Image: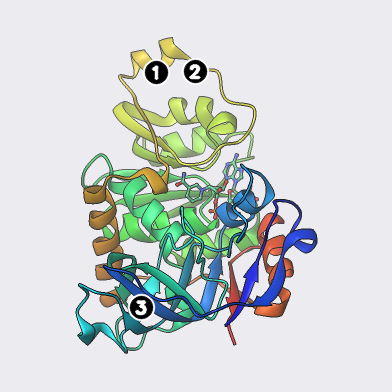
Amino acid sequence: MKAAVYHRRGPARDVLEIVDLPVPAPGPGEVRVRVRVSGVNPTDWKSRSAGPDLPAEGQIPDQDGAGEIDAVGPGVDPGRVGERVWVYNAAHGRFNGTAAQYTVVPSAQAVMLPDGIGFDVGAGLGIPFVTAQHCVFADGPVAGRTVLVTGGAGAVGNAAVQLAKRGGARVIATISSEEKARLAAHAGADHVLDYRAPDYVAQVRRIAPDGVDRIVDVAIAANLSDDIDVLVGHGTIVSYATDAPDPTIPVRRLMTANAHLEFVLVYNLTREQREAAVNAVSEALRVGGVRPMPEHHFPLDRIADAHEAVERHALGKVLVDIP
Ligand SMILES: NC(=O)c1ccc[n+]([C@@H]2O[C@H](COP(=O)([O-])OP(=O)(O)OC[C@H]3O[C@@H](n4cnc5c(N)ncnc54)[C@H](OP(=O)(O)O)[C@@H]3O)[C@@H](O)[C@H]2O)c1
């Protein structure tokens, strides 16, 4: 099969190569997916750039993808062969990422794609939507609550806006450009604010005089002070991204607010948390509750360009078309 692979960590165009590899066989409890589209996320270039030495076989990149199951291992219902699926965490602790004609994953990591939902949409779900779903709902339902999503045009942020709206919340999203404002509004944000405006905190307070109930934050170090200023007592700030340097924690202000500060790494959710998030994303997909971002397509031969596009914060979803 045709696959992208890297054997050492470093810049995309220095380490990524296209090679021919044997088609992998699914083991017990696994399915093999004929990948049609691979979705690229920041995690893919970050783990390609730095980390411990790789095993001799190297690493096929990319966690997310979509395609059809073409073989199942022992213990998996053979009726799954032919099923259209979206795939998540394919490269997490495993060789076979999605930037290849075939990947092999545990059966639960290949989730049925409803009829009428394309592979492009499916390949954009895993990391952004599962993370967003968990961040928005980790502290319980949001119906009737006000949720602030910072970076509402980012992949995770945009998914969080959509999922919070779907959960019945009033959603405030932050952005830094007109184009990003349109994307956040398209996702369903009730209010879209430029977080760089000098009166940003006052704007949030006008919308939510008692404070916002939950904040899903993409840049906790930059935003923590503003977050505390707009958070309701006993409210929750959920951080899922690092922006160096780490913030100083203003204990007195957080204590006064009886604030909850939560941190999320999607790879380390418990099995129950992951299942709950994946099922909720599937349900959103089934009822038409997912609005895809603009797409940037690259052929597999140009996967280095795709990784670089994500490193440069391309606005929208970066996808690799698998031949
Ligand atoms: N913990 C996890 O499990 C997990 C899961 C997924 C992603 N992540 C991480 O989360 C980050 C975002 O991922 P992504 O795929 O959503 O990236 P993305 O599509 O590039 O979006 C990042 C967004 O953050 C916004 N942003 C940056 N600084 C901001 C600030 N101070 N306030 C408000 N918005 C700000 C950017 O908008 P502006 O240009 O307007 O600032 C941009 O829209 C990455 O670092 C990624 O590695 C972590």
Local SS, label 2: loop
Local SS, label 1: helix
Which image quarter holds the N terminus? bottom right
Tell me if label 1 and label 3 are in contact, CB under 8 Å.
no
Query: On the image, which quarter does residue 222 sit in?
Result: top right
Label 3 packing within 10 angstroms: few (<14), some (14-19), many (20+): many
Identify the mark at residue 249; answer none if there is no mark: 2
Q: Nearer the viewer, residue 233 or 205?
A: 233
Which image quarter holds the C terminus? bottom right
Residue 41, image x and y in percent?
Answer: 56, 59
The residue located at (74%, 51%) in the rendering is 10
Identify the mark at residue 254; answer none if there is no mark: 1
Which residue position is annotated with label 3?
A: 85
The residue located at (70%, 51%) in the rendering is 9
The residue located at (21%, 49%) in the rendering is 272
Label 2 packing within 10 angstroms: few (<14), some (14-19), many (20+): few
